[in-house]
Amino acid sequence: MTNLILLICVASTWFMTGLIWFVQVVHYPLFDRVEEIAFSRYHSDHTRTTTYVVLIPMILELITSGLLVGRPPTGTDPGLAWAGFGLALASWALTFFLSVPAHNRLAVGFDLSTHRRLVRTNMLRVLSWSAHAVVVLIMTARTLR
């Protein structure tokens, strides 16, 4: 059962890592290219549809990371499980305390300062998910030995 939990954690973490890199490099930088008159609708659609894509993987990542703390996979250091769980929690915290407020401000209309802050602070989420991806990869490699 622990291996299945690890596999779900790996899949959800790597999914979110790839997605957050795409958002950072491609998607968020293009916000300032949307016509001002269309931005509010564009942003509303973006927020709604992005939630459909990220909600389940984020929940799965958080739950499986927490479960791995209680039952680290064979051959792995419990510290890795704790690091992974901490990084998953960090991704959630960064999302709700930095990204969501920026999106709430952008929901009323494009603001260059808020947009720049969103892109800049999103890099923290990129780093958090990327680090978690490395942690679960190490855990998987040690489990396969």
Image (cartoon, grey):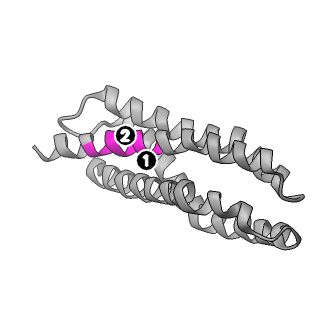
Indicate the amino acid at tag 2.
Answer: Leu
Q: Which residues are magenta?
A: 129-137
Q: Which quadrant of the rendered structure holds the C terminus?
A: top left
Q: Are marks 2 and 1 in contact (CB under 8 Å)?
A: yes
In depth, the one of 104 and 31 nearer the eye is: 31
The residue positioned 46% from the left and 45% from the top of the image is: 129
The residue positioned 23% from the left and 46% from the top of the image is: 140
Indicate the amino acid at tag 1.
Answer: Thr
The image position of residue 120, as x and y in percent, is 63, 41
- Secondary structure at numbered mark 1: helix
Q: Provide the residue designation for mark 2.
A: 68
The residue positioned 82% from the left and 68% from the top of the image is: 39
Q: Provide the residue designation for mark 1.
A: 64
In depth, the one of 53 and 102 nearer the eye is: 102
Q: Is residue 78 left or right of residue 55?
A: left
Q: Is residue 141 left or right of residue 104?
A: left
Q: Is residue 106 left or right of residue 81?
A: right
**Vertical position of residue 107 compared to residue 62: above or below:** below
Q: Quadrant of residue 123?
A: top right
Q: Residue furthest left?
A: 145
In depth, the one of 49 and 58 nearer the eye is: 49
